[in-house]
Image: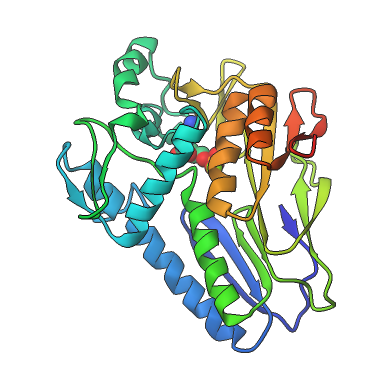
Amino acid sequence: MALSGCTPAEARYEGFHMDTYVTLTARGLGSDELLERCAMRLTELENALSAYRPGSDIRRLNEAGGDWTALGEDAFKLLEESLRYAELTGGAFDPTIFSAMNAWDGMSGSVIPSDEALERLKPLVDYTGIELDEAGKRARLKPGQAIDLGAIAKGYAADCLFAIYREAGCAGIINLGGNIYAAGEKENGGKWRVGVRDPRGNGGMIEVIDASDISAVTSGDYQRFFESGGERYHHILDPETLKPARTDLHSVTVICESSAKADALATAVFVMGREAGGELLSREGLSALAVTEDWEAVWIGARE
Ligand code: AMP
Ligand code: MG
């Protein structure tokens, strides 16, 4: 994704958070201070939600061996939201995918796990094994299960930053590695224009979306992958097979007011494919720009 409409008068922040490049722009009174607050919030979210960060809420939960674990507000809320999307997508989005992701060494290319190894992990990839205790803000997993919020955490973070913008009455673009929230409007009162990059990586755009107070999130087979023996292994796993999802799409860009929902659904619709994914989006009244296996850009879902 790329941005346009940014003028030199805007405040700008660039940093590296949640394993991705973050660019924030903001216009309005106190926008420098606003961006500082946003950067602090991102650090806070990272410390709570990263499965890799020692001491994070999610890491503590993963290491608890099936015991109840007290969680901070963000981790609890996001886990709750994740369960809703796991159910909504029939498990195409499943946050208990971490043990499988680890078997693939995070898609580094260093290992291709055997079918037997993946078979053994299958009982662990099952979101119904997550238990939440609303009153005590605690969670527990089935022993051996582990959570990975990588398919939704950036969306959740974009929502958190958008809340800060809105409260301050600031407009701008929140870009967490292509996970975009367009806050407010451009200075001239027009909508932001969010470009959707061609997944073939030729630097071109396949579409420019008019956006105001809305998020656009892309999942695709070109974002993180390795090649071996003529096969491409990308980073979005089918929770049924624990292998890179075999899908008829190269990418999906979901448009939604909730960036967490857009993020979870982009991952799920990619796994589900054009037809089942399109039906799910329609039921939710949402649209997505999809790139088909023939590299055709089509709208699926409500706008089809
Ligand atoms: P995204 O780029 O939002 O589609 O998220 C992909 C990341 O989420 C991967 O790098 C994994 O960490 C994790 N992941 C992979 N497959 C799934 C899945 N089916 N459901 C939930 N998380 C997944
Ligand atoms: Mg996602």
Q: In this view, does 152 lie to the left or right of 201?
A: left
Which of the 4 quarters of the picture holds residue 111? top left
Which of the 4 quarters of the picture holds residue 185? bottom right
Question: Residue at coordinates 24% horizontally, 36% vertically from top-left?
Answer: 141
Tell how many labels: 0
Quarter of the figure that contains the C terminus: top right
Question: Residue at coordinates 63% horizontally, 22% vertically from top-left?
Answer: 247
Q: In this view, does 23 lie to the left or right of 288?
A: left
Q: Is residue 201 left or right of residue 258?
A: right
Residue furthest toward the top? 116
Residue furthest toward the bottom? 29
Q: Where is residue 72 in the image (x, y as percent from the top left)?
A: 28, 60
Residue placed most toward the observer, 223 or 131: 131
User: In this rendering, is residue 57 above or below 280?
Assistant: below
User: In this rendering, is residue 269 above or below 138?
Assistant: above
- The colour scheme is rainbow
Q: Where is residue 155 in the image (x, y as percent from the top left)?
A: 53, 53
Question: Residue at coordinates 64% horizontally, 79% vertically from top-left?
Answer: 170
Q: Where is residue 296 in the image (x, y as percent from the top left)?
A: 82, 29
Q: In this view, does 73 lie to the left or right of 69?
A: right
Residue placed most toward the observer, 165 or 11: 165
Q: Can residue 113 be seen in this view?
A: yes
Q: Is residue 224 visible?
A: no
Q: Where is residue 65 in the image (x, y as percent from the top left)?
A: 16, 37
Q: In which quarter of the image is ligand 2?
A: top right
